[in-house]
Amino acid sequence: QLNFCPCHLPMADAAGKAARTDGFHLLIDALKLNGLDTIFGLPGIPITDLMRLAQAEGMRVISFRHEQNAGHAAAAAGFLTKKPGLCFTVSAPGFLNGLTALANATTNCFPMIMISGSSEREIVDLQQGDYEEMDQMNAAKPFCKASFRVLHAEDIGIGVARAIRAAVSGRPGGVYLDLPAKLFPQSLEAGAARASLVKVVDPAPRQLPAPEAVARAVQLLRSAKRPLILLGKGAAYAQADEEIRGLIEKTGVPYLPMSMAKGLLPDTHRQSAAAARSMVLQQADVVMLIGARLNWLLSHGKGKTWGKPGSQAFIQVDIAPMEIDSNVAIAAPVIGDVGSCVAAMLVEITGSSWSPPPREWMDAISQRRDANLAKMTAKLSQAPSPMSFHSALAVLRDMVKARPDAIVVNEGANTLDFARSIVDMYEPRKRLDVGTWGVMGVGMGFAVAAAVTTGKPVICIEGDSAFGFSGMEVETICRYNFPVCIVIFNNSGVYKGTDVNPSGHSDVAPTVFVKGARYDKLMEAFGGVGVHATNQAELRAGLEGALASGRPTLVNAVIDENDGTESGRIGNLNPQSGLSKL
């Protein structure tokens, strides 16, 4: 008897012999025991039967066309649920395909466990040329939070427990678990198997901040003449929504959300300074960072983005002490989990008198915000033909406002940059995008994860270049009938579709795609709904139909090929030759 559940494991078979199990079933039961019930992966040697058996045992198994996309799905699932998402891959090349997603999860602090089958240790270690030979555990180490290998079935329970705790405790991240092929058919007595399983207790314990750190941070914020609270995706991950909202509204301090923190409070909230971003970053005198890092996305906390050098004092709420002072001096570090830190500061503030920020500061922000929003409104009201990024996003802005429960997935260059500022979010964790690395190719994996973990409709706002990295997963979306609507901003190229080959050769320029491409036909090929939209009315009709039906839909939104800028808003990171201008 191999098929068992830890809750009702038979101690003997019909003949009275001690029941036995194996590595396949033990792994499945270890995962289920810890509430991990969904696998994103791709079957193949040596995990094909593992995925079949997992499905037979009641786990949900979502099979992808490429391991990288399965990995991105696992990472996004981890962000949305605070439980490690599971990605299963085959050995060597499949492992390497998933490694990009594992590294990206670690960089973005998303809890994820990538479990890969691997070749036999005795052959790999002697480099004797085994099937897909690779020392995967050591290859993964530089790119994840922890990397483990299990050689004996009786250690599977401990291996899974260690992976879970490593993924979610402290600063979350990606974990690799290496399982050689020989492990799966290893047989052991069912009673011993039951005893070897580990149910992880309190895998991500609260980390309470020091009272003196809380008092110091509150006092510094109280002293500010031009305070600002900056919310990062760590604040969204924490699911401390009420505490964060309470802190912001109690203090009256204006706040600025990073892209995946949008919706913690509605973007239309009166204290949002998003539409006055440049001004508040330059002029704030005290900045409180909550779940945000002073990395390249915030110009490392210095330079012209931040105004006069040394004009700001920083408060930083972070779970990792080593993050403090990583780019600039932090005057008031508050170390602990976001929820506990914010709750403690709120208690400190509530227990004393608190004056709102000076009216001059709030009025200046309001004036700048209103002026910028007026300019944006004027631009969004235009209806050029072909559509521009702005006119197309005006439709999506309206659709998201009508369906604030929908998950927005966004990637691209201009498509990302414009959507981030144009499309308002109203609820927490409803926006997933390219994150810390700005990596393309997350779109379809993130969309699948959002559909699986939330059951809500998903709207993917995709640049045509970004879509190419994971576009084949439209078949996965159709196969499982996920309620995903993909909108491809098709301007026939990377950035835009007007570059020419400077050599005069017949080859097109490196940044140009096929003119008049019909991405909608790709969706139709797998049984989904394809929409070709050349104007706002057609785009709106396609979106409304998708949200009403819940069917997999792809809208090919034709954008003026002249619209777009080089590298979007980070063109300064793309060096150009000073010797020759193209």
Image (cartoon, helix red, strand yellow):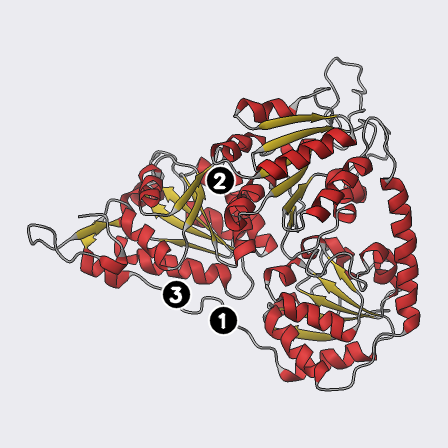
CA gap, disc 2 and disc 1: 32 Å
Closer to the eye: label 2 or 3: 3
Circle 3 residue: 200
Q: Secondary structure at mark 2?
A: helix
Q: Is residue 410 visible?
A: yes
CA gap, disc 3 and disc 1: 11 Å
- Indicate the position of residue 228 as horizontal and vertical percent values: 80, 67
Q: Residue at image x 85%, y 74%?
A: 357
Farthest residue, direction front: 548
Farthest residue, direction bottom: 352
Q: Which numbered tag is attached to residue 285?
A: none
Kind of residue at disc 1: Pro
Circle 2 residue: 96
Q: Which image quadrant: the C terminus?
A: top right
Q: Which numbered tag is attached to residue 205?
A: 1
Q: Residues within 10 Å of mark 3 (few under 14, many from 20)?
A: some
Q: Residue at image x 78%, y 48%?
A: 421
- Indicate the position of residue 214 as horizontal and vertical percent values: 67, 80
CA gap, disc 2 and disc 3: 29 Å
Q: Secondary structure at mark 1?
A: loop
Q: Residue at image x 80%, y 79%?
A: 222
